[in-house]
Each structure stands twice: as structure tokens, then as C-alpha cells.
Amino acid sequence: MWLVVMFDLPVDTKKARRNYAFFRKHLLAGGFTKMQFSVYIRHCASKENALVHAGRVRQHIPPDGEVRIIAITDKQFERMDIFWGKMRKQPELPPCQLELF
């Protein structure tokens, strides 16, 4: 399961820029990677794990701006069409699962 966080935060004042930087740094520290500008993704092992990480993101949402969080399955994520110029690219693969013997 993939957790996608999309946001549009103001950066017109010093305090707003500080809030933006704090929120972005929290996402990176929480294991999210930048997919596009203001779009960050994180792979989660299960729906319950995705709910935990979504809750952590909710705790750090700045008072101004807009933040959207969506969880999508691996199957939905792999059906994404990605274009770079006119060449089609494959979506990122989920990280390898830890195997225990």
C-alpha cells in the first residue's frame, strides 16, 4: 500500500516558510520520498501501517494551506502511467519485503 501526501502551503511570510519547511522535513524524516513538487509518497506494509503514518502526518499539518492524504494499493499504483517528455516510464517498484526463515 502506498501513502500519498499532496499539499499546497503558503510561503508568503517568514512564519509560513518555516511551517512549510517543518512539515516537509517531518515527511522526509517519516520515510516519505519526493515524487513531484509538493507530492510525497511512502510505501506501507499494510493498511494499518498506512493509517499510523497518516495519523503522524495529520499531527504536523500547518494551520494554513491545504494537505491531502490518500492511500492506494500496490496494484493501483502500478497501473499509473508515467510520461517523461514523450517516453513512457515504469512506476517505482515497492521496496523488497524482509524475508524471515
Image: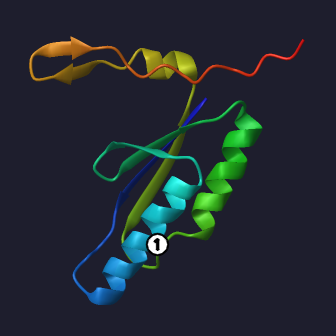
Residue found at the far left of this picture: 86
Q: Foreground residue, 66 or 29?
A: 29
Q: Foreground residue, 70 or 36?
A: 36
Picture coordinates of residue 93 (x, y %)?
48, 19
- Quadrant, the C terminus: top right
Q: Residue at x 42, y 22 (%)?
A: 92
Q: Residue at x 51, y 49 (%)?
A: 69
Residue found at the far bottom of this picture: 14
Q: Is residue 4 left or right of residue 31?
A: left
Residue found at the far front of this picture: 101
Q: Residue at x 26, y 76 (%)?
A: 11
Q: Relative to residue 9, is residue 17 depicted above or below?
A: below
Q: Foreground residue, 24 or 58?
A: 24
The amino acid type found where label 1 is placed reads Phe
Q: Is residue 3 left or right of residue 101?
A: left
Q: Relative to residue 72, is residue 62 depicted above or below?
A: below
Q: Relative to residue 57, is residue 43 depicted above or below?
A: above
Secondary structure state at the residue bearing disc 1: helix
Residue found at the far right of this picture: 101
Q: Is residue 15 left or right of residue 42?
A: left
Picture coordinates of residue 83 (x, y %)?
20, 21
- Quadrant, the N terminus: top right
Q: Give the residue at mark 1.
A: 22
Q: Foreground residue, 101 or 54?
A: 101
Picture coordinates of residue 39 (x, y %)?
37, 47
Picture coordinates of residue 73 (x, y %)?
57, 25
